[in-house]
Amino acid sequence: MNIFAENKKTVVKEYLSFIGTKEFPCIAAKAALARQQVKCMVAGNMACPNEDAGILQFLYEFVDEYRNSKDFYHSAAIIFSGPLINSEEMFDALLWQRLQALQVFDVENYYYDDRVESDTSSPKFSFSIKEEAFYIIGLHPASSRHSRQFKYPVLVFNPHEQFEQLRATTKYDVMKNAVRKRDIAFSGSVNPMLQDFGKASEVYQYSGRKYEDSWQCPLKITHAETKHNPST
């Protein structure tokens, strides 16, 4: 399947239709869709670094737009042309490759978001681009989670601060419980890797793969030291 043989607008429409289905469990994604605040980029092969600079520029522009908006619920999706993902392990490896490449570029111009921690083993870790923390969700056709089974590999970047703002209100627990109930109905169970921020590192949730206890995140953060956020 070659994404470039299709109209890119059609691919984006397919993704938006996917998250817009009645059964899709993520209420925040649906809210962003309803507000037309889901930004999409159709990229090349996920295994290839050729578009890393373009992906980073897309995310930088998304950060600027998000910061300048008074509205809530924003999301950015990178939809890749391939490769054909045939296992969760394959997608997992490519996810960390792309995130590693993006952070290598980002470190040339920006510090880490000091509202979160850069240590991937920390319960307060979140991935940072342009000093803006993101919670990342991976989608691909081989996912064991029905809610993550999309025809192309996708990396979804959700601003972490949105979740922090929700946590400061009564809306967060209501939304969290509703999403988990919907996920049980859609996938048959709650994601076994799912934990609230501050209880376990987000890295266990990004790809949707169920990790062994001995698994260690391969991502190496190399951003310069800041007062609140020492990196190694």
Image (cartoon, grey):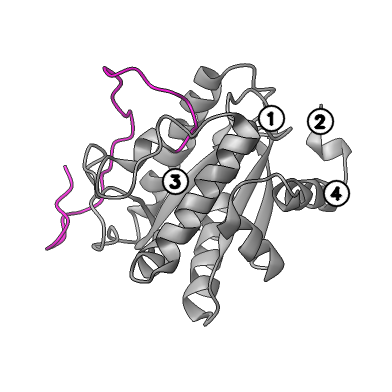
State which tag comes first along the sequence, 2 or 1.
Answer: 2
Badge 1 crowding class, 10 Å Cα cut-off, few under 14, some 14 to 19, many 20 or more, is many
Q: Position of residue 101 (x, y in %)?
A: 43, 40
State which tag comes first along the sequence, 2 or 4.
Answer: 2
Q: Is residue 50 magenta?
A: no
Is 189 situated above or below 74?
above
Do residues under tags 2 and 1 come within 8 Å of each other at their CB atoms? yes
Badge 2 crowding class, 10 Å Cα cut-off, few under 14, some 14 to 19, many 20 or more, is few
Q: Amino acid at mark 3?
A: Leu
What distance separates the C-alpha of mark 2 from that of mark 1? 8 Å
Count of numbered tags:
4
Residue in the picture at 69% in, 22% down? 84
Circle 2 or circle 4, nearest the eye? 4
The span picked out in magenta is: 206-232
Residue in the picture at 33% in, 53% down? 107
Q: Which mark is residue 126?
A: none
What distance separates the C-alpha of mark 2 from that of mark 4? 13 Å
Instruction: Assign a secondary structure to mark 2.
Output: loop
What distance separates the C-alpha of mark 2 from that of mark 3? 24 Å
State which tag comes first along the sequence, 3 or 1.
Answer: 1
Q: Which mark is residue 102?
A: 3
Mark 2 lies on residue: 2
